[in-house]
Amino acid sequence: MATGGERIGCEYFRGSGQHPAFVFYRSESNGSHTEVQPRAAAGGLCYYPEATCEVTEFSCCTVTRAVSKEADRCQLHNTLYCFAAIFLTFQLPGLCRRLGFTRSKASEEESAEEASESQEDSEEDEPESSQTGVCVRRVLRILAGLAIMAFIAAEVYCAILIANATQRALTVPERNSMLAADAFLVPLVEIFQFLEDVVAVKISAAMVTGETHLVRHILIMGVVGGILCGTVAASVATAICSWPAAIQWILAPYSMHDSYLQCPLVPQGPAAADSARMYWLLQVWSWPLGFACRAIKGFLFGSGDIVLGMTVLGLANGMVSIGGIYLFFLPQPSLDSLGWISFASSGASFLILLAMFAARRDLRKRYDLRITRPLAF
């Protein structure tokens, strides 16, 4: 390690040079903070012994302006590239047809015949109404594409917003407890992705074979099964949360070993369990309605009504998540607030989807979506 004022170059994110990724501070008695300089070991590893990082109420480090600028630039580029990729995906087939890349002579003859037939039919019928219908369908396709892009953008923005807000507002022990809980809960939730896939495949198969009367039963089976699976999984997770040794092993596995050094930035086992217990419970009990929403999304995918459903669902999630972050989490950052936001988002999504079914009379009539048992099949 560097001693006697000896300066050894530190390795930063751009190699040896003057580009540190973080700036560390020391807390002063008057409440202010002073930037501290790094010391370097012989191998080039930087450390900041004068930084006041043992106090959880004081933020001892922050990202440098250069790194923040690069991150913002990459985020902007990522957003633009995603929009461009989605737009090209929707427009490339039509562009290829217009340029004639995929048209053979036979297809040209068929299209010419179809054009002549449609022209004759249009001459016999009202030309203005047909042209109006074509324009309306074209506008609806454009609006559908914009709606899907808006849904994807809202989902991405919510994920980035929550990550940035928790990183900046939560203390290091709370953030560590949240990441430890998510590392166990998120893979467990993804196991139940089959609910959406199975419902989508079964409904698509029923519609292809013309057995639309089965759609109602498949949807009810998926929703009820999702609620039951979510309840069972939440009950198991609640039992784990009530077992002190198990929840401490999940949230703070390092505390089970003798090599645990009692670092003030790393919460101890009981402290990690206490800080994340309510967050854990609210997350797991949002699963029943969340799994039911997965089944409903599978129905929307299979029936072809995905645009409206995903747009409505994206608006519900976006409003609850963004509103909850700004109104409840940022004024008083805590893991409990994040848990309530996730719970409210799951409930709002389920209620919004039910309201969509109540408003779509044509959808209910088409698939006989009623709670009462039908008299005849």
Image: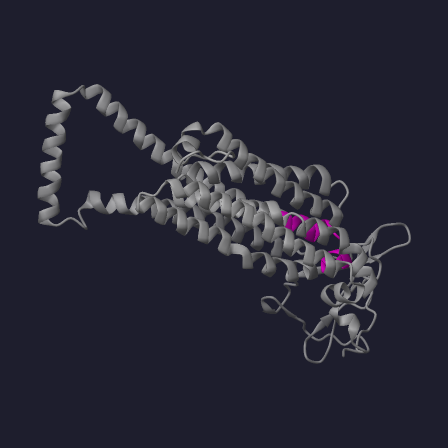
The magenta stretch spans residue 88: no
98 or 193: nearer the viewer: 193
- Residue at position x 40%, y 43% from top? 214
For residue 85, above or below residue 38: above
Would you say residue 62 is visible in this rendering?
A: no
Residue 48 seen by the camera = yes
In this rendered view, identify the residue nearer to me: 184 or 18: 184
Residue located 47% across and 38% down the image: 309
Q: Nearer the viewer, residue 162 or 300?
A: 300
Would residue 169 appear left or right of 287 to someone viewing this image? right
Point out residue 62 in the picture as x, y percentages from the top left corner.
Answer: 71, 56
Q: How many marks?
A: 0
Q: Which quarter shows the N terminus? A: bottom right
Instruction: Give the main secondary structure, helix, strand or loop, of the magenta stretch.
Output: helix
Residue drawn at point x = 59 percent, y = 61 percent: 187
Apparent side of residue 73 relative to residue 168 in the rendered image (left or right): left
Q: Is residue 210 left or right of residue 321?
A: left
Measured as percent of width and height from the top left, residue 191 is found at 55, 59
Is 172 a magenta residue?
A: yes
Quadrant, the C terminus: top left
Q: Position of residue 341 (x, y in %)?
A: 67, 43
| Image spot of residue 215 (x, y percent) | 41, 42
Relative vertical location of residue 240 with respect to residue 334 in this rendering, above or below: below
Please, which colouring scheme is shown?
one colour
Q: Which residues are magenta?
A: 162-178
Name, please, the residue furthest toward the front. Answer: 375
Q: Quadrant of residue 368?
A: top left
Q: Residue at x 52, y 35 (%)?
A: 371
